[in-house]
Structures are given as structure tokens and as C-alpha cells.
Image: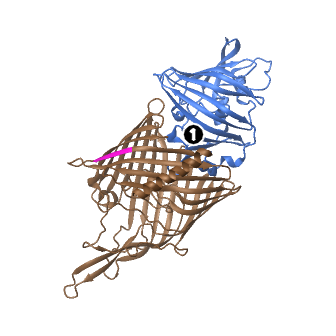
Chain colours: A brown, B blue
């Protein structure tokens, strides 16, 4: 860690030396974030201090951005990483971006359907701000502009997987396996090579009537599926041991999204078809406990205002069309999100917000109320809660992780 | 709807009225005056830095800074704004396309750097206050004079200038103001002051011209103040670095530029 901090200091020094010479912009924030679990002991769920810096420079022809960040935790753990570090080249009708970058596609909020290029950091489940959930990927991105339409091509030479919580984290997920397995991570990594690279394309139309995107991708599933190797007693047929082998699989994805206005309401939609998705199966005839099935994920949403309160609602459905009852996942999974937001006081300096995920299939969900106040320009204090309900499903499994938190942030 | 955002090109064109052209020598009606203002000669394009100073009842100030570009494409006027300060909204951008066709609503998009996404938003929020200021989105637009009934209630001299005092009442009973009263300078055709009354007929706020400059033959309102009497809060808008008719390219008003920023 000491070497990484030294490296960070060196990068800072070089950037600043360069920047003071020629118009570098330095922005960012410092934040303190403290969360308390609503259990008997009122344990801290998180005590985190953050420094997030953005170094940017842009001319009419070129630009760059470097976004290092540091999380410092109460147990003295320090996480240092670079979220983005890329170069931009601007031409008359096209732009090229090379380097580590966050690439965000689609019209959905808080759910990931065609937005599959930048993998997710789920170290704190879905509770981080969205810019912190999405990890940068090293990629070459070409945008070619035809009037208000854009053709985008992305090549990701090195695969990055979803980052899951640590084993001892309150957000860790235990795989649904009959006995405690022995993990074999030998197949988890994807060897960097041209053959193993990922490619994505998108055509987007930006118009008065409607904005829409059509996309396709040949990628890896960022979430590994657990293959299993069972050792069974030939006499008693009892399971003696289980080896769990996480493995990523190739995915082919095609989809699209749109948004348009009907009167005072913005209507949004997004959908994708995935070929080659792998699911865990309990079928004893399947040796490694994994089956390949196609998969559909889509969303419909509406944004509108009532009495000065801004609402944003989404209905999301995930379907495994060729389903069988051995598959661990549900055949269909229905989810809703609801966001309500209103500003108060002169200058709109007090903000009230309620965001909820509601699992319609498993009867679970997450309610996230928060109130924030702009103490002065650039300084904001926020109080919030994360309330889980249900006893199964994506949110119900964290039913004991209800918490309240406070964040104070200075942006500069 | 196209005219809605012209205000910010000349800052507050509906509220601080000014007009080119000759003053017809016939007896003018209130509608004549408001039409002259509405149909004034305006620049083909403009860029400027807009600074809004919000002042609360204690006198404490908050400052918002925006870089804006506006261009008239004939049937559509396009505007793009880049937020510079405060720091927590920096690199947010907003784009508005407004149309000559009065039946066609504006198209609006916002780019949020945290989400790295351009989102289409509804333009049906004219009563909302712009960035916490004392200006509603509607105040910042050109209201078609045909939407109100106008009458000249008196003439009055302010700072040595003869003004028509025009009272405007909306034809739509649900409009956010029950009436407005505007002081329009005779022969110069710009406004010095405008009073707003809320839906209950109570006095709400006053807009006052602080400074106007003639740039390339256009009268540009560069500084105004809106004082909200009911909230005891005020906002000063100030345009600087004004550039007019420089031939801003059409590609400035695209999703590409919203994402790229300044």
C-alpha cells in the first residue's frame, strides 16, 4: 500500500507540475461518510473518508482526464485507485477516447440493461453513488457524428469483472449450494488477448420527436457463474465434497432504448436480449450444475411532476424464455423503482428524496429516504436511511442491514 | 415556444422589454406595445457568461455561474448552457430547443456528469424556479402577447424617462400570475420595471433593469434584479463576456457538446 500511495503522490506531483504550467483544471471533493446499522449494538456499517480528484485539460483538438480517488476506512484500510484516466482526440466529425473510462449506455436509472460495458463495484451492494458503482474499463472508443446521430464503437481489450463484497462484508453473498464448497478460482480470470477482447457498437438518434439507441455487443458476462464439481459416495450416494469454480462466459447482446415526451410526461424504455447467459441448475443430470439459456431484460419508465414533486418510476422485467424448474433463478423477475424528489427553502437549498427498489416477484425491496442541505455553495450535508424489507430475493437477503447514515461533502 | 429562452439571450426579454423599430405615431394600445417588444430585432446568435447572485433575507449570497450559447435556426431556436459554479453542479449542461410553432412544446435535455448520461426532461415546469433563483422558467422566456389582455393604465416618468405603464392579465385562468404591470420606455421600447402578482392577486415580486448596453446595434439587457417581496429574497442576473453574431456552429447544440462541456 505504501508503494501505491507513493505512486499516487508522484502522479499528483507530475500532473500538478504540468498543470500549473498550462491550464489544468483540478476539481473534486472531500467526503466523510458514516453509517450505523439499526441492530441492537448499533454497529457502524461504514466509516469512510474520501478524496476524489479530477484533473482535466481540454483544447479544441485534444484533452485528458485523470480521476484518482482514495477511500480511507476506520480500520485504517486505504483503498487507492484510478476511476478514469484517458486521452481525448477531437476531429471534425469524430472523436476518439483512449484509456480507462466509464462508458454508460441506455435510458434506465439504477438498473443495468444495455449499460453493460463498465462493470459494477458492488463492494457496498448498490448503495454507493452511481458514479462510484461503475468502474472504468480500459477501452478505445470511437464516436462518429452524422448530424444529431452518433455511431459509437467500443473495443475493450482487457476484460474487467464485477467487483463483489469481501467475504467478511455485511454485503457478501453466499452461493446457493448444498454444502460449504471448496473454491477453485483457476478459471475465474480471462487471459488478456485479442481473442478475449470485447466489442460493442451503438447507433443513437437524438431528435425532437424521440431519442433512441440501438446497441450490440460481444462481451463477457461480468458476473461469474459457479460451476460445481461434486464428489459423491458411490455406496450411500451422499455428497462428500463440493468444489465451486467461478467462471465468466461469453455473452452476445443486442438491445436498444428510447425516451420521448408525451405532454408533460417523459416516457422511457430499454430492453436487451442476451445469448449465452449461464445459470445455476439443480438438475442432477447436469454434471457441473450450470445451464446455458437466453435471457431477456427490459424496462418501461415515466418521469413526471405533481404539485412540484418530481417523480420517476420504472418497471423492470427479467425473463428466461426457455425455462425449466431446475434453474435456481425465477423464470420471471419483476422489479419497480420509484423516485420522488422536491427542493425546499429559498434558493432550493434543502432537498428531500425518496428512492425505492420494489421486488414484485419476491416481495422484497429497499427504501432509501434522504434529506440534504446545502450549507453553503459546494458544501452539503446529507442524512439518509437504507431500509430493506422481505426475507428473500435481491434485497430481502439484506433484511438485517437496515442503516442510517450521514454524509458531509465539500466539492471544489 | 421558440421564444421562451430568448430572455437569456437578452437576459429577460419579456420582463425587461426593449424593442427596435420605429414608434408608430398612431395611438398605441397595450397590445401594440407588447407586440413591438415581442417582435423586436434580435441577434442571430449570442454567447455570454451569466452570473446569478441569490441573496436571502439575512443578506447572505450564493452565486451560480453559467456559460450559455444561443442560436436562431429559423423555425427553431437552440440554446445550450454549461454550469460552471457552484462546484457540485460543475459540468452539468442543459439544452433547450424552442419552436416557432406555438403548439409545439420545447425539447429539453440535461447532462449530469455523475451519471455520464444525457437525459430528456419535460419542459412542463414553467412555474419552477430556475436554479433556486427568483426567476421562474416562464419569467426567462418570451411570453406571446396574444396570451394576455393588455391595457395602458397610465403614463409615468421614471428617472427622467417617459414610460407607458401596461397592465397584462392572462387569458388562461390557471397561469401562475394573476396580472403583471410593466413600465415601457416611450420611444426606446425597453422596460424599466415589471411587477408580478400571484394567483391570489397579491403583490409578489418586482423586476428592475440595472444596466443595458447597445452591442452591434442590439439593446442587450446586461443586469437585472428580481426582488421577491413575499419571500424577502432577491436575485441579481448579470451577463458578461457577451459576444454577438459570431457565427456559432450548429454542432455546438448537440448531445456531443453537452457531454464534452466547455
Q: In front here: B231 or B248?
A: B248
Residue B119 in sight from this viewpoint: no
Residue drawn at x 52%, y 50% as measured from the top left: A13
**In the visual, does B232 lie left or right of B149?**
left
Query: Residue A53 placed where, x, y %?
Result: 49, 48
Q: In this view, does A278 lie above or below A264?
A: below
Query: Residue A371 placed where, x, y %?
Result: 38, 39
Q: Label 1: few (<14), some or many (≥20) within 10 Å?
A: many
Query: Residue A107 placed where, x, y %?
Result: 52, 54
Q: In front here: A382 or B14?
A: A382
Q: Is residue B236 above or below residue A184?
A: above
Residue sticking out furthest to the bottom = A235
- The verdict on residue A120 being magenta is no
**In the visual, does A259 lie left or right of A4?**
right
Q: Is mark 1 on a helix, strand or loop?
A: strand
Range of the magenta residues? A32-36
- The verdict on residue A35 being magenta is yes
Residue drawn at x 23%, y 49% as measured from the top left: A39
Total count of labels: 1
Could you tell me which chain the residue with mark 1 belongs to? B
Q: In front here: A322 or A101?
A: A101
Q: Quadrant for the C terminus of chain B, please.
A: top right
Query: Residue A2 placed where, x, y %?
Result: 40, 56
Residue A339 in sight from this viewpoint: yes
Q: Quadrant for the N terminus of chain B, please.
A: top right
Residue designated by label 1: B84
Amino acid at each position: 500500500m505504501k508503494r501505491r500511495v507513493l505512486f499516487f503522490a508522484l502522479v499528483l506531483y507530475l500532473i500538478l507540475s504540468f498543470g500549473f504550467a498550462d491550464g489544468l483544471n483540478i476539481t473534486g471533493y472531500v467526503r466523510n461518510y458514516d453509517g450505523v446499522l439499526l441492530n441492537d449494538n448499533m454497529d457502524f456499517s461504514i466509516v469512510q473518508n474520501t478524496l476524489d480528484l479530477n484533473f482535466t485539460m481540454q483544447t479544441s483538438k485534444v484533452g485528458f482526464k485523470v480521476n484518482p480517488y482514495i477511500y480511507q476506512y476506520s480500520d485504517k484500510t486505504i483503498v487507492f485507485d484510478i476511476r478514469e484516466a484517458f486521452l481525448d482526440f477531437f476531429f471534425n466529425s469524430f472523436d476518439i477516447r483512449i484509456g480507462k473510462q466509464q462508458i454508460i449506455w441506455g435510458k434506465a436509472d439504477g438498473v443495468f440493461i444495455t449499460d453493460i460495458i463498465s462493470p459494477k463495484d458492488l463492494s457496498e451492494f448498490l448503495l454507493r453513488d452511481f458514479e462510484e458503482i461503475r468502474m472504468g474499463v480500459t477501452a478505445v472508443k470511437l464516436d462518429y457524428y452524422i448530424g444529431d446521430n452518433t455511431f459509437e464503437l467500443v473495443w475493450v481489450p482487457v476484460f474487467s469483472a464485477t467487483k463483489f463484497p469481501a467475504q467478511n462484508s455485511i454485503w457478501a453473498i453466499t452461493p446457493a449450494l448444498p454444502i460449504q464448497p471448496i473454491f477453485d478460482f483457476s478459471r475465474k480470470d480471462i487471459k488478456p488477448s485479442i481473442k478475449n477482447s470485447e466489442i460493442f457498437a451503438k447507433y443513437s438518434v437524438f431528435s425532437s420527436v424521440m431519442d433512441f439507441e440501438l446497441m450490440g455487443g460481444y462481451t463477457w458476462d461480468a458476473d461469474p457463474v459457479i460451476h460445481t464439481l461434486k464428489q459423491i459416495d458411490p455406496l450411500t450416494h451422499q455428497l462428500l465434497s463440493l468444489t465451486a469454480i467461478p467462471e465468466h462466459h461469453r455473452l452476445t447482446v443486442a438491445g436498444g432504448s428510447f425516451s420521448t415526451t408525451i405532454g408533460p410526461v417523459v416516457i422511457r424504455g430499454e430492453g436487451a436480449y442476451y445469448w449465452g447467459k449461464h445459470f445455476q441448475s439443480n438438475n442432477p443430470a447436469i454434471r457441473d450444475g450450470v445451464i446455458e439459456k437466453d435471457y431477456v431484460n427490459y424496462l418501461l419508465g415515466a418521469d413526471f411532476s405533481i404539485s412540484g414533486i418530481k417523480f420517476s418510476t420504472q418497471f423492470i422485467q427479467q425473463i428466461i424464455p426457455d425455462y425449466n424448474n431446475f434453474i435456481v433463478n425465477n423464470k420471471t423477475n419483476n422489479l419497480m423503482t420509484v423516485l420522488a424528489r422536491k427542493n425546499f427553502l429559498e434558493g432550493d437549498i434543502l432537498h428531500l428524496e425518496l428512492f425505492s427498489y420494489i421486488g414484485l416477484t419476491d416481495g422484497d425491496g429497499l427504501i432509501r429516504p434522504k434529506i440534504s442541505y446545502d450549507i453553503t455553495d459546494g458544501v452539503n450535508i446529507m442524512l439518509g436511511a437504507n431500509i430493506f424489507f422481505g426475507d428473500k430475493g435481491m434485497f430481502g437477503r439484506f433484511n438485517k442491514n437496515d442503516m442510517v447514515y450521514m454524509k458531509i461533502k465539500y466539492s471544489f | 415556444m421558440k421564444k421562451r429562452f430568448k430572455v437569456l439571450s437578452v437576459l429577460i426579454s419579456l420582463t425587461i422589454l426593449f424593442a427596435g423599430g420605429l414608434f408608430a405615431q398612431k395611438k398605441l394600445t397595450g397590445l401594440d406595445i407588447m407586440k413591438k417588444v415581442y417582435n423586436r430585432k434580435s441577434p442571430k446568435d449570442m454567447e455570454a457568461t451569466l452570473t446569478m447572485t441569490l441573496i436571502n433575507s439575512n443578506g447572505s449570497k450564493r452565486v451560480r455561474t453559467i456559460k450559455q450559447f444561443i442560436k436562431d435556426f429559423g423555425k427553431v431556436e437552440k440554446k445550450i448552457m454549461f454550469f460552471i459554479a457552484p462546484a457540485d453542479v460543475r459540468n452539468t449542461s442543459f439544452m433547450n430547443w424552442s419552436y416557432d410553432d406555438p403548439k409545439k412544446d420545447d425539447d429539453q435535455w440535461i447532462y449530469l456528469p455523475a451519471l455520464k448520461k444525457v437525459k430528456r426532461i419535460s419542459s412542463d415546469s414553467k412555474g419552477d424556479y430556475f436554479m433556486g433563483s427568483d426567476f421562474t422558467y416562464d419569467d426567462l422566456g418570451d411570453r406571446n402577447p396574444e396570451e394576455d389582455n393588455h391595457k395602458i393604465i397610465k403614463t409615468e416618468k421614471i428617472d427622467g424617462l417617459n414610460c407607458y405603464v401596461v397592465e397584462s392579465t392572462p387569458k388562461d385562468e390557471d397561469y401562475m400570475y394573476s396580472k403583471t404591470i410593466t413600465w415601457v420606455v416611450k420611444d426606446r421600447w425597453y422596460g424599466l420595471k415589471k411587477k408580478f402578482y400571484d394567483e391570489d392577486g397579491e403583490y409578489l415580486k418586482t423586476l428592475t433593469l440595472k444596466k443595458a448596453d447597445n452591442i452591434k446595434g442590439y439593446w442587450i439587457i446586461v443586469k437585472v434584479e428580481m426582488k421577491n417581496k413575499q419571500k424577502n429574497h432577491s436575485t441579481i442576473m448579470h451577463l458578461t463576456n457577451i459576444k454577438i453574431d459570431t457565427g456559432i456552429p450548429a454542432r455546438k447544440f448537440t448531445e456531443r457538446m453537452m457531454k464534452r462541456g466547455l
